[in-house]
Image (tube, rainbow, N blue to C red):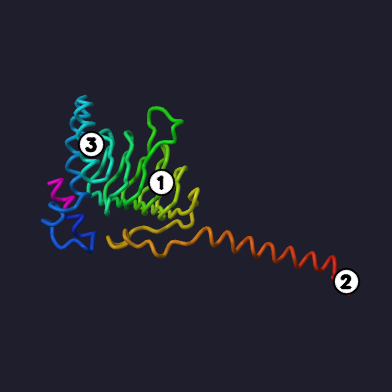
């Protein structure tokens, strides 16, 4: 039931998927879930070398690297998948969406729990990096290209490098919401606009204090 549920979930969320058979035969995001279940089973039973061998074979076949120790919940949708990396102590909740180029990795400074934990219904946009043992709450959206280094509360939207919370309260109302990334604010543009406005105020003040020579 688990893998069939995963395949149907991909079919439902990917507008390019025509049917479940196409997902099962052609989609690397589904193939990596199959191989990870095998690798994770072996990892839990301390067959570490064989588990890692299967995960590395899957990496070469799919372009997706998931450490066999990572824990993945139900209905994970990996879209495209190329360049994705999940570290050993990564934990992912149910009904999450991960786009290509995403890293759920470590900082190199932590021991034990070194990688992120994602709650349920989390979306991580293309090229985003979530680093360290941070917790990403339920219904969170991480904008494409963002770098998350701190915990994010439930129902938040975060964008930027490093990521900043720009919205709270984006509870998902339908599956299509997972794929809507167009409404995310441009935090860099906002910061530039704020600097320009501040500069204009300073220039106006200086002109008032030091009127130009005539």
Nearer the camera: disc 3 or disc 1: 3
Q: Estimate the x, y position of residue 92 in percent, counting from the top left.
A: 30, 43
Q: Label 1 neighbourhood size at 10 Å, few (<14), some (14-19), many (20+)?
A: many
Magenta range = 1-7
Mark positioned earlier in the residue sequence (3 or 1): 3
Q: How many marks?
A: 3
Q: Secondary structure at mark 1?
A: strand
Give SS at disc 2: loop
Q: Earlier in the sequence, mark 1 or mark 2?
A: 1
User: Which residue position is annotated with label 3?
Assistant: 55
Q: Nearer the viewer, residue 137 or 125?
A: 125
Q: Circle 2 sits on which residue? A: 213
- Residue 27 in percent (x, y) is at 19, 52
Q: Residue at x 79, y 64 (%)?
A: 206
At a point 48% along the width and 53% down the height, the residue shown is 160
Seen in the image, is 200 located left or right of residue 111?
right
Q: Residue furthest front?
A: 60
Q: Seen from this angle, which residue lies furthest bottom?
A: 214
Q: Between residues 193 and 121, which one lies in front from this camera angle?
A: 193
Badge 3, how many Cα within 10 Å: few under 14, some, many 20+? many
Where residue 155 sits in the image (x, y, percent)? 40, 53
Distance CA(mark 3)–CA(mark 2): 74 Å
The span from disc 1 to disc 2 (Cα, nearest Å) is 54 Å
Residue 172 lies, in percent from the top left, at: 33, 59
Quarter of the figure that contains the C terminus: bottom right
Q: CA distance from mark 3 to mark 1?
A: 21 Å
Q: Nearer the viewer, mark 1 or mark 2?
A: 2
Q: Quadrant of residue 54?
A: top left
The numbered mark at residue 129 is: 1
């Amino acid at each position: 039931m688990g893998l069939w549920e995963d395949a149907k979930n991909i079919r439902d969320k990917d507008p390019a998927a025509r049917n479940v058979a196409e997902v099962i035969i052609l989609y690397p995001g589904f193939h990596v879930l199959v191989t990870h279940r095998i690798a994770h089973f072996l990892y839990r039973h301390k067959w570490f070398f064989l588990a890692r061998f299967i995960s590395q074979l899957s990496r070469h076949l799919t372009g997706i690297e998931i450490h066999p120790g990572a824990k993945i919940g139900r209905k994970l949708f990996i879209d495209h998948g190329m360049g994705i990396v999940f570290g050993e102590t990564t934990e992912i909740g149910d009904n999450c969406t991960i786009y290509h180029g995403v890293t759920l990795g470590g900082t190199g400074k932590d021991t034990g729990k070194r990688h992120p934990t994602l709650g349920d219904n989390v979306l991580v946009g293309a090229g985003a990096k979530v680093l360290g043992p941070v917790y990403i709450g339920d219904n969170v959206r991480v904008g494409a290209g963002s770098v998350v280094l701190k915990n994010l509360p439930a129902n938040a939207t975060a964008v930027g490098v490093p990521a900043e919370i720009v919205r709270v309260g984006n509870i998902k109302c339908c599956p299509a919401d997972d794929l809507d990334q167009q409404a995310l604010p441009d935090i860099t543009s906002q910061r530039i606009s704020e600097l320009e406005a501040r500069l204009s105020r300073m220039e106006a003040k200086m002109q008032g204090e030091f009127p130009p020579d005539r």
